[in-house]
Structures are given as structure tokens and as C-alpha cells.
Amino acid sequence: MKSKGIRMTAQRKVIMEILKHSDSHLSADEIYLKARERKINIDFSTVYRNLNMMEENGLVSKLDFGDGKRRYELKEKHHHHHIICVNCRKTYKLKCCPLDGLEEELRKKSRFKISGHKFEVYGHCPDCQ
Amino acid sequence: MKSKGIRMTAQRKVIMEILKHSDSHLSADEIYLKARERKINIDFSTVYRNLNMMEENGLVSKLDFGDGKRRYELKEKHHHHHIICVNCRKTYKLKCCPLDGLEEELRKKSRFKISGHKFEVYGHCPDCQ
DNA sequence: AATGCAAATACAAGTGATTTGCATTATAGG
DNA sequence: CCTATAATGCAAATCACTTGTATTTGCATT
């Protein structure tokens, strides 16, 4: 962060730690609650402002699983997608990417300059079936 | 609609016509505005209630292109996805589906009972490049 | 053509997630 | 330590969408 002239504050440290130590994808209110548990004074607006800032700086990824709240995870080295349980919201990481082997074809057919994509699979996890 | 005991009202007729004559995917406020242009008295709540009802009855599809508003299109016979221009929001239909040939593999690996999926590609259309 | 009633509407108010304005506080370079 | 200014907390606003309710309307039946 410092390299970009971004100040390291107590609130930012906590948000980063919470994301680091969570295995799932947290929504803003979950992050807010976890931060409060750590007895740090923080406001929702600070959580949102920082998550947006971190996304702009490529530190976190914003996810949308279609339940009306955005979720956040630390940006990972390897590109991946998710399969999401529509009942308990548990997720499972998918290493495969539908754009592999499809990108060139799409570019030709659509003549778009492709810059991103979204792929999510929904279903019922083993526990919820 | 009648076969399902659903009444045909002036408002519903207009919403269906707007969807039918539009080549793009309209948001609720675009539908509301277009209906108003046709000088029909209609409220936002009616637009939303009807779009939800139509989705539940398999008449329209709800789409989410990640810009914070849901979009609607008349349900089409053949399953498809979209490539969306991040600048002008124009869309192009993709006939290919990433789940073809992937579904069985995913089911085995994740042990999820797959019920749905989302796939969208983003980029700049020829006009916006 | 008139009746009756459930279904659908308009309007207003309510949600829930996220954003913004602004006075105050705190980080990091000098 | 000082100081500029970035970041915060707080309150209020916004945005997309939903809900409660009194009133109206479609339509099957007289």
C-alpha cells in the first residue's frame, strides 16, 4: 500500500487481517461485525470506502453471488471461479475457466475487445441436498 | 397468461410489448419510462411486481450484468449468454454455454447438485474500442 | 348490460445495501 | 514535534427494490 501513497491505518489493517484469515467470501456487514469483535472502532462507511479502494488497487476482488450483497476476497494469484450453494451459501473453488479455449473464438465472432468475465455455478452442496 | 389464470391488464400488455419490441435488455426504470411515454398510467411497484410475476411464470428472464440493476428480456427458446460492452452496455448474444461438457466434471469434483449458472463476458464493442 | 368478488393497481412508506458531505482526528514526511 | 492532508466517524442521502393498503378493474356469471 505504501508504494501507492496509501496510509496504513488501524482500520485497514483489521480489514486485511479479517480477509486473510477467512476462508470464505465476506460481505461488508460480516467484515464490519468481525472488526467490531476485535474491539476496534470502525464505521460501515469506512469498511465500504476501504473495500472499494482496495479493489481499485487490485488488492481484493469484488464478487456478486446474486443474493443482493457484494462479497470480497483477497485477490489470489491464480484465476478461479466458484460454485455456490443456493441454500447455505457455502462455496467451492473451481480452477477451470470457461474462457480457456473460448476467448479467441468469442473475439472473432463478436469483435469485442474482451476485458473480463464472470462465471458462477449454483446448486446444492452435499450437506444441503 | 390466461391459461394460468392471470389477468391481462393494460399495464401488463404494455410491459410485454415494450420487452417484445426492444432488442436490448431493459431495466425496470427503462421499462417504466417507456410505458410512461405511451401515456399509460403505471407505477414502479406495478412494473416490479409484474416483472417478478412474469419471471416466476417463465415468461421473462432476469439478468444481472453487475451494474447494480437487474435487466429483463423475454424468455427465449434457446439457452444463451451475453457479451456486454462495459462502455455503452450494448450486448451480443453468445450461443455457446460453458457448462456444455463441463457439467459432469463439476458435479463429480464438487459433489454439488447443479441447478443453475451465470456466464457473462465483458469488453468493448467494435464501436467503443 | 349489470353484478360481485378476487386480483391488480396506485400511492406512500419502508427496506437493505451502499454512498456521500463534512467536521474532526490521525498518519507519515520533514 | 509540526504540519499538511488523507482517513475516519457520524448523520443523512441515495438507489434499487419491496410492501401495506385502500381503491379500482377484469372477467365469469347472472
Image (cartoon, coloured by chain):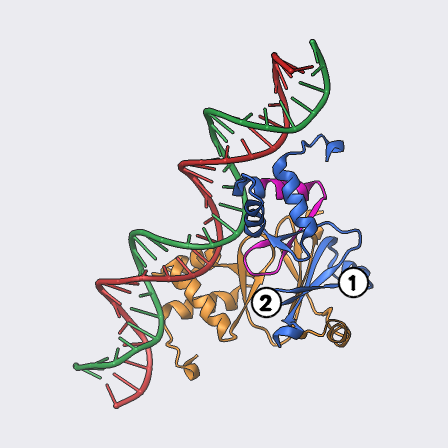
Chain colours: A orange, B blue, C red, D green
Residue B7 in sight in this render: yes
Label 1: which secondary element: loop
Given residues A13 and C1, the one toward you in this image is C1
Name the residue beneath numbered marker 1: B95
* Disc 1: host chain: B
What x and y, as percent, mark residue B100? 81, 62
Task: In this rendered view, identify the residue nearer to me: B55 or D22.
Answer: D22
Residue B113, position in %: x, y?
75, 52
Amino acid found under the numbered disc labelled 1: Lys
Q: Quadrant of residue A106?
A: bottom right
| First reached walking from the N terminus: tag 2 or tag 1 | 2
Measure the alpha-carbon separation of dots 2 and 1.
21 Å
What residue is at 49 percent from the left and 75 percent from the top? A57
Start-end of magenta stretch:
B48-70
Q: Is residue A45 left or right of residue B111?
A: left
Magenta stretch encompasses residue B64: yes
Residue at image mark 2 = B88
Question: In front: mark 2 or mark 1?
Answer: 2
